[in-house]
Image: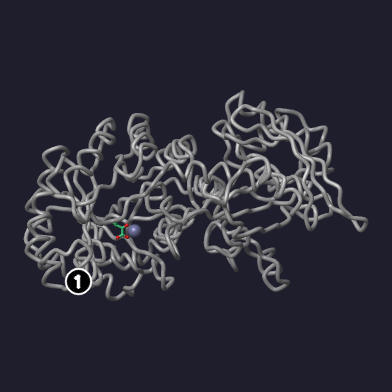
C-alpha cells in the first residue's frame, strides 16, 4: 500500500441493510458480497453477527466464499458480541472484527457510563478482540460530536489495546468538509501511536455532505472510506461508494489518491442493490441515476454532438454503461440475448440464461421491442427460490360496470390456496385477495407505479412498502400488466417481511449486560 492508496470499506450489507425496509435474503447477501469482492472492494462489512441467526450465517458464508476482500463483522463493546463476530469472520482468508461504542455525551448516557468506565471498557473490549484477530477496527460512534479531549483519550486507548484501524464516524451526518479534514488531521497529529494505524472516515448524509466530508477526511489523512452502494443506509443514507470512487478518479488532478475499484462494475452492482434492497435509485442520482448521462436539452445535445467533453466529465463506459444499442425482439435468439446481457454487465451461467430467456420470450410475445431497461427489469425480478408465497394465477374484472374483483391462486408454504375478493378498483381487489389468503396485519405504506420504457405496451414497475410492528419491507416487480406487477410486488414485500420477522436487530447499547460475559 502506498501513502496515496485509499481503502474502500463497503458496508452495504450492514449499515445499508439496517435501513428500514432494505432487508435482503441470504442468497441476495451472498450475491452482493461476491459482486463487491469482484469489483475490488478492500473490506466488506458483511453484517452484525450477534443480531440474528440469519446475520451470523450470512457473515459466515460470505467469509467462507471471500476471494480477495477482507471480511468484517460488527460487534458492540462486549465480549459476547465480539466472540460471535469472530466465530463468523474467522473463516475468511482475511478476517476483521469491527467493534464500537458511542463516545459522545449523549451516547455515553445510554449505557450510563462515566468517561472513566467507558475508557476501561474500550481498553478491555479492544484487547479481547485483538486476542482473537490480528485485524481489529474500532469506532467511537458519534465521534464528530464527542468532546475533543475525550476523543483523543479513547482513540489512544484503542490504539494501545491493539486496534489496527480507527474509524471516525459522523453518525448523524452533522460535520462539514473543513471540520471533517481538520478532525482527522488533528487526531493524527495529536494522538500517540496514530501513525501506526489507518484512520477511516464513516459519514452519513443527513445534510447531503457525506461524499464531500469523506473526501475531505482523505485530505486530512484518512486512508479508508466507509461507504455503501447507491448511498444506501439509515435516514438519508451513507456515503455513496460510486460517488467517492468516481470523484477520486475524475479529479485525480487535485485529489491524487487511488482506489483499486474496477469502476466499470459500478452500474451492475448499483442495479442489483436497488433491486434486492427495494430502494430504487433516484433518476438524477450522481453516477448511477438514469439521467446521470442523459443529455436531453437542445443546447446539451448540440454540444455533445460536436464534442462529448462539452458536457461529459466521465464516459458512460467508465461506470459500466453501454452506449444506446438496438432493442431485441421476439425473433432474437439466445446468443443475441447473451451478448446483450454481457453488454449490460450480466455474466450468466447456462441455467440462469435459460431462465431469463424464457422470461424474455414471454415478454417479447407481448411487447414488440425489448429495450435494455426491459431486460434489466426482468432480471431484477426476484427469482423467489426462498419465497414462501408465490403467485400462481390472477384473473381480474374491472371497468365501469363494477364490482371489481380478483380471483387469485397462490402457493403458500407449498400448499395451493384460492380465493375471490372484491375491492375499490382492481389493485385494491388484488391486495384484498392476498390478505384473505395470507393472514397478516401489515399496513401498506407505499404503492408506486412507473413505466420502464415508453409506449402503452411498456412494462410497469411497481414498488410496495409494508409495515408491521415497526418492521418495514419493500417489494418490487415489473410486468406489462400493471395489476399482475402489483400483485407480485405485494407478495414480494410480504415474503421479505417474513425474513424481517426472523431478524430482530438489537439496539446499539448493552444496558444491564456485563460486557465481560462471554
Ligand atoms: O454510523 C455509525 O456510527 C456506525 C457505527 C456502528 C460505526 O455505523
Ligand atoms: Zn453508520
What residue appears at the point 67 percent right and 40 percent down from the top-left corner?
437
Residue nearest the observer in this picture, 16 or 443: 443
Where residue 183 appears, as percent x and y from the top left, is 22, 70
- Which quadrant does ligand 2 occupy? bottom left
Q: How is the image coloured?
A: one colour
**SS class, disc 1:** helix
What residue appears at the point 17 percent right and 73 percent down from the top-left corner?
147
Is 366 placed left or right of 78 in the picture?
right
Circle 1 crowding by C-alpha within 10 Å: few under 14, some 14–19, many from 20? some
Q: Which residue is mark 1?
A: 105
Is 260 placed left or right of 498 in the picture?
left
Quadrant location of residue 316? bottom right
Residue nearest the observer in this picture, 365 or 114: 114
Where residue 435 appears, as percent x and y from the top left, is 66, 46
Quadrant for the C terminus in the image: top left
Where residue 399 appears, as percent x and y from the top left, is 89, 55
Above or below for 116 versus 467: below
Above or below for 328 versus 240: above
Residue nearest the observer in this picture, 248 or 470: 470
Amino acid at each position: 500500500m502506498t501513502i496515496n492508496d485509499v481503502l474502500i470499506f463497503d458496508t452495504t450489507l450492514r449499515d445499508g441493510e439496517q435501513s428500514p425496509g432494505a432487508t435482503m435474503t441470504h442468497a441476495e447477501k451472498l450475491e452482493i458480497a461476491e459482486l463487491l469482492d469482484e469489483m475490488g472492494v478492500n473490506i466488506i462489512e458483511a453484517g452484525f453477527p450477534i443480531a440474528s441467526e440469519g446475520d451470523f450465517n450470512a457473515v459466515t458464508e460470505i467469509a467462507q466464499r471471500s476471494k480477495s476482500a477482507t471480511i468484517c463483522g460488527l460487534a458492540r463493546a462486549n465480549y459476547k458480541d465480539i466472540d460471535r463476530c469472530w466465530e463468523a469472520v474467522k473463516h475468511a482468508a482475511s478476517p476483521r472484527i469491527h467493534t464500537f461504542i458511542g463516545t459522545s455525551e449523549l451516547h455515553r448516557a445510554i449505557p450510563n457510563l462515566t468517561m472513566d468506565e467507558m475508557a476501561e471498557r474500550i481498553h478491555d473490549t479492544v484487547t479481547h478482540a485483538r486476542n482473537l484477530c490480528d485485524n481489529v477496527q474500532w469506532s467511537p460512534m458519534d465521534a464528530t460530536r464527542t468532546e475533543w479531549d475525550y476523543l483523543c483519550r479513547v482513540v489512544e486507548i484503542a490504539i494501545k489495546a491493539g486496534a489496527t484501524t480507527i474509524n471516525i464516524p459522523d453518525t448523524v451526518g452533522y460535520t462539514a468538509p473543513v471540520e471533517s479534514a481538520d478532525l482527522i488531521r488533528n487526531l493524527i497529529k495529536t494522538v500517540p501511536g496514530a501513525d501506526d494505524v489507518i484512520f477511516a472516515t464513516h459519514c452519513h448524509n443527513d445534510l447531503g455532505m457525506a461524499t464531500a466530508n469523506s473526501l475531505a477526511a482523505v485530505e486530512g489523512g484518512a486512508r479508508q472510506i466507509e461507504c455503501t452502494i447507491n448511498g444506501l443506509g439509515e435516514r438519508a443514507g451513507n456515503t455513496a461508494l460510486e460517488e467517492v470512487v468516481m470523484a477520486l478518479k475524475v479529479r485525480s488532478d487535485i485529489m491524487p489518491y487511488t482506489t483499486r475499484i474496477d469502476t466499470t462494475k459500478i452500474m451492475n452492482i448499483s442495479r442489483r442493490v436497488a433491486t434486492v434492497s427495494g430502494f430504487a435509485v433516484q433518476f438524477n442520482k450522481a453516477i448511477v441515476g438514469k439521467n446521470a448521462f442523459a443529455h436531453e436539452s437542445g443546447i446539451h445535445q448540440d454540444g455533445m454532438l460536436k464534442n462529448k467533453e462539452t458536457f461529459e466529465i466521465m464516459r458512460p463506459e467508465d461506470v459500466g454503461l453501454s452506449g444506446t444499442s438496438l432493442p431485441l425482439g421476439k425473433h432474437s435468439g439466445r446468443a443475441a440475448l447473451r451478448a446483450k446481457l454481457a453488454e449490460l454487465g450480466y455474466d450468466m451461467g447456462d441455467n440462469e440464461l435459460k431462465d431469463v430467456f424464457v422470461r424474455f420470450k414471454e415478454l417479447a410475445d407481448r411487447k414488440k421491442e425489448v429495450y435494455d431497461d426491459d431486460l434489466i427489469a426482468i432480471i431484477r425480478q426476484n427469482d423467489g427460490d426462498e419465497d414462501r408465497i408465490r403467485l400462481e394465477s390472477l384473473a381480474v374484472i374491472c371497468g365501469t360496470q363494477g364490482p371489481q374483483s380478483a380471483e387469485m391462486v397462490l402457493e403458500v408454504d407449498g400448499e395451493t390456496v384460492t380465493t375471490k375478493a372484491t375491492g375499490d378498483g382492481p389493485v385494491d381487489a388484488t391486495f384484498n385477495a392476498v390478505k384473505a389468503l395470507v393472514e397478516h396485519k401489515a399496513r401498506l405504506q407505499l404503492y408506486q407505479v412507473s413505466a420502464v420504457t415508453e409506449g402503452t405496451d411498456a412494462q410497469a414497475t411497481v414498488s410496495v412498502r409494508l409495515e408491521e410492528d415497526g418492521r418495514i419491507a419493500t417489494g418490487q416487480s415489473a410486468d406489462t400488466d400493471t395489476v399482475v406487477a402489483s400483485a407480485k410486488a405485494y407478495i414480494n414485500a410480504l415474503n421479505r417481511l417474513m425474513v424481517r420477522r426472523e431478524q430482530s436487530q438489537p439496539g446499539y447499547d448493552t444496558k444491564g449486560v456485563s460486557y465481560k460475559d462471554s
